[in-house]
Image (cartoon, coloured by chain):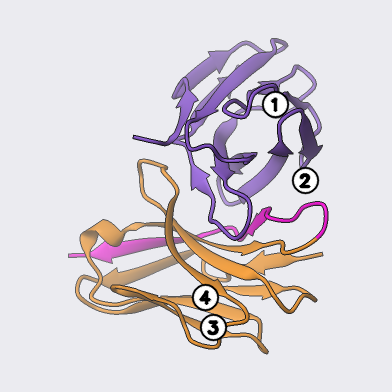
Chain colours: A purple, B orange
Amino acid sequence: DGGITQSPKYLFRKEGQNVTLSCEQNLNHDAMYWYRQDPGQGLRLIYYSQIVNDFQKGDIAEGYSVSREKKESFPLTVTSAQKNPTAFYLCASRRQGNSPLHFGNGTRLTVT
Amino acid sequence: AQTVTQSQPEMSVQEAETVTLSCTYDTSESDYYLFWYKQPPSRQMILVIRQEAYKQQNATENRFSVNFQKAAKSFSLKISDSQLGDAAMYFCAYRVPYGGSQGNLIFGKGTKLSVKP
């Protein structure tokens, strides 16, 4: 079955450490997205990529980095510069055109 | 800048009854897409329904329908014959139609729907 896989489901890190969240899709989608979800805040866009080897900052990109070396993969690194990294992170993808977003199951990151 | 507002942080409905969730948005564009997503406790985001702005007819998907008022920039979701499985967070979203961020979704802050048996 096609879909978006985010791993791990839960992730714990110590403050000051970088951590990378994985996102893989086998839907052959061109565009991929990372959203952050906090209680009462809805979903906020961190980074997005419309094609391989290209990506753009979203609304809250500070303290995050991404890469898009392969069409299927869009990993997100949460760096030590992110002041409040504890959150739920959602990866999404879609085909070009008017297709809707498909979401992964998310990763809950806790930094202490 | 485009914004999406959901004015009801929480709603409650009796099983088998009907409930309407509100959403308003702000845009200067004339052609765009609007969406409702459901997020149950599993936190999986599920597309419920979508509306194309150029279509006057309101979208319908089984028990879910929308009331799209383009001039008022309103996009409410009606759930008929509510079921226990409808309990979830519901997010309204606007898709940017043009420009460098074309295709990006702007989300409201969500409405938590509870269904009472």
Please name whichever residue, B85 or A70, is drawn nearer the observer in this view of the structure: A70
Q: Which residue is mark 1?
A: A68
CA gap between label 3 and label 2 equals: 27 Å
Mark 3 lies on residue: B68
Magenta segment range?
B99-117
Question: Residue B113 colored magenta?
Answer: yes
x then y, percent, for residue A41: 62, 50
The amino acid type found where label 3 is placed reads Phe
**Is B28 on the left-hand or right-hand side of B66?**
right
Residues under labels 3 and 4: Cα distance?
11 Å
Residue type at numbered disc 2? Asp
Question: Mark 2 = which residue?
Answer: A59
Would you call the spot at circle 3 few (<14 residues within 10 Å), some (14-19), or many (20 or more)? Answer: many
User: Tag 1's secondary structure?
Assistant: loop
Write the residue at 42% across / 42% down: B43
Q: Nearer the viewer, mark 2 or mark 1?
A: 1
Q: CA distance from mark 4 to mark 2?
A: 24 Å
Of the image marks 2 and 1, the number of the one nearer the N terminus:
2
Residue B22: numbered disc:
4
